[in-house]
Image: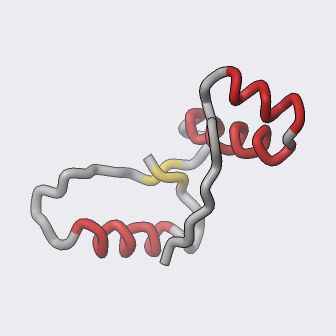
Amino acid sequence: MIEAREGQDERDRAAIYRALGSDPNPPLTYSHHTPTNEPLLWVPDAVAWAWGRGGSWRRWIQDLGMVSSVEVVGVD
């Protein structure tokens, strides 16, 4: 499940196609949804916010076992 964003969905599809190729039976299925239609898309935003906020918020998500470290990588 990928968050639908105007202007981004086509780039998502292109990146997935580049990664998986033209396999008629790819090992991955996906669909785009808006956060208003899929509340689970809120979870990564909430966790990222808490990590970025730091302090007790970061400790709280670490104690829950949600995040132990963050690595930022570039995506073409």
Q: Residue at x 80, y 48 (%)?
A: 52
Q: Position of residue 48 (x, y in %)?
A: 71, 45
Question: Which residue occupies the foreground of this view, 46 or 70?
Answer: 70
Question: Which residue occupies the foreground of this view, 72 or 11?
Answer: 72
- Left or right: 36, with 17 as reference point: right
Q: Residue at x 50, y 48 (%)?
A: 33
In the image, residue 36 sits, relative to residue 24, either above or below, namely above
Residue pushed farthest left? 24
- Left or right: 53, with 4 as reference point: right
Q: Position of residue 19 (x, y in %)?
A: 30, 69
- Left or right: 62, with 52 as reference point: left
Total numbered labels placed on residues in the image: 0
- Left or right: 75, with 49 as reference point: left
Quarter-of-image position of residue 68: top right
Question: Which residue occupies the foreground of this view, 46 or 5?
Answer: 46
Q: Residue at x 44, y 67 (%)?
A: 12
Q: Position of residue 66 (x, y in %)?
A: 61, 30
In the image, residue 5 sits, relative to residue 3, either above or below, namely below
Residue pushed farthest bottom? 76
Q: Residue at x 62, y 61 (%)?
A: 72
Question: Which residue occupies the foreground of this view, 43 or 50?
Answer: 50
